[in-house]
Image (tube, rainbow, N blue to C red):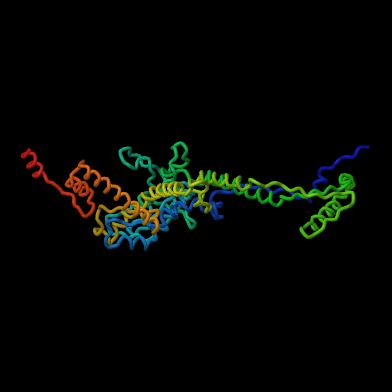
Amino acid sequence: MSKQFRVDGFLQAVLGGKSPARVTSVSAPFLYAQGGIFRRVVDLPADKALSGGFEIEGDADNLLASELDRLNVFETAAYALKLARLFGGACVVPLVADGKGLNEPLDVSRDVEVVELRVFGINQVSVEGALYGDATQKNFGEPEFYRISSREKQFVVHESRVFPIHGFRLPEMLKDTRIYWQGGNAVDCAYKAILDWETTRERTKQILDRKQQPVYAMKGLADLIDGGMENSVQQRIQAVDASRGVLNTVAVDGEDSYTVNDMNVSGLTDIIGKFEQVISAETGIPLAQLFGQSASGLSATGEGDLRNFHELVEAERVRVGNMLERLIALLVLQNGIKGKIPDGWRIKWSPLYVPTAREQADMAKLAVDTLKTEVDAVAQAVSIGAVSETQAADYFAQREQFGLKREVHDGADAQDYAAKT
């Protein structure tokens, strides 16, 4: 009579009843809340865009600067931009003391005061009622009212009190709401790449744990399992595993054998690096900013990556800029400020990169060397008679170099010159 091999008994004896854990899907906000790289790909461009702040040209008495500090505008704008990157849109709702309710149009004809700024992701906002229907107006097709769901309650807000930050531009057919500032987010593709990267890291750890794979060849293993002695088999395996170590001796039965197979793990870091490059490509954030990695390769300085990152940050400043301009325009109308800020005010962002003292010295030296080359060329032209000394002086005067000033001729001088010729 042939013996039947019991697979379930074999697994019970060797694995001890273990089964691999299943991975469940989670939402983008939950991943963001975990922190780490999930939060970094969202926060880094927003924090960089607002970290240096900005100035208001025309705010000579720093009236607006004081209001920006009072309302914590920089941190609020950065948080709103983060929500826009996470959800595909966000809005700032200023609480204004204008004698009107939130569901009424903002009244700037009277003295107003901005009391506080509230921030909401587009996932908390829905359209209430109909859209504007006058095709001759700029607000055609836009909502007149929004319903906002906060943690405390729901409330209706007139659109004049909602200062949106648009998501990334999407075709109209892909929008699933009537909110015109709905757009794409920065996390859908990025989080998929990060999850793949984390899976790769976890598998790499498992490979390293099994770099040296022991093989215990037990004589009569199938017969023992067929005889219902799985527990005995498992105890023998556990005894060998417990005694295995650098300073220990492994003892097995004379007819058994015990060997250790060493696995080649070269190339694992390269594989992980490829997944990190995918994350960088999906987010537009260089590896140096994401993981703190220096640029690799011959003559690699990372300047190109830094330039690309600054272009990404500049684009984020453009996205948040419209909301900031509307907010500052409202602050200008406040009691105590109204009439004191010129109409030509504008936002002046701080530079994204400030050269070090050495870099400034190098640039100054380069400018001096360039000027010396230019002076030598002009002097050579004068020495061979190609130009006169007067023409050479005029050349430098046009550039206002060496203290020379450019002469400005009016129309009368031109007429006199024409009459003489």
Residue 228: horizontal and vertical position, in percent?
Answer: 88, 48
Residue 117: horizontal and vertical position, in percent?
Answer: 40, 58
* Farthest-out residue, left: 419
Would residue 405 appear left or right of 65 to someone viewing this image? Answer: left
Q: Which residue is drawn at 48% across and 53% down?
A: 43
Residue 350: horizontal and vertical position, in percent?
Answer: 36, 55
Q: Count every numbered label the image shows and give the total.
A: 0
* Farthest-out residue, top: 173
Residue 47 position by quadrant: bottom left
Q: Which residue is drawn at 34% across and 61% down?
A: 67
Q: Is residue 268 above or below residue 34?
A: above
Between residue 206 and residue 180, name the one nearer to us. Answer: 206
* Farthest-out residue, front: 384
Q: Residue at x 18, y 44 (%)?
A: 388
Would residue 376 appear left or right of 42 to someone viewing this image? Answer: left
Tell me if I can see residue 199 in this picture.
no
Q: In which quarter of the image is the C terminus?
A: top left
Tell me if I can see residue 200 in this picture.
yes
Between residue 164 and residue 358, name the one nearer to us. Answer: 358
Residue 390: horizontal and vertical position, in percent?
Answer: 16, 47
Q: Is residue 180 above or below residue 105?
A: above
* Farthest-out residue, right: 1
Residue 101 position by quadrant: bottom left
Q: Residue at x 58, y 47 (%)?
A: 273
Q: Quadrant of the N terminus?
A: top right
Between residue 350 and residue 182, name the one nearer to us. Answer: 350
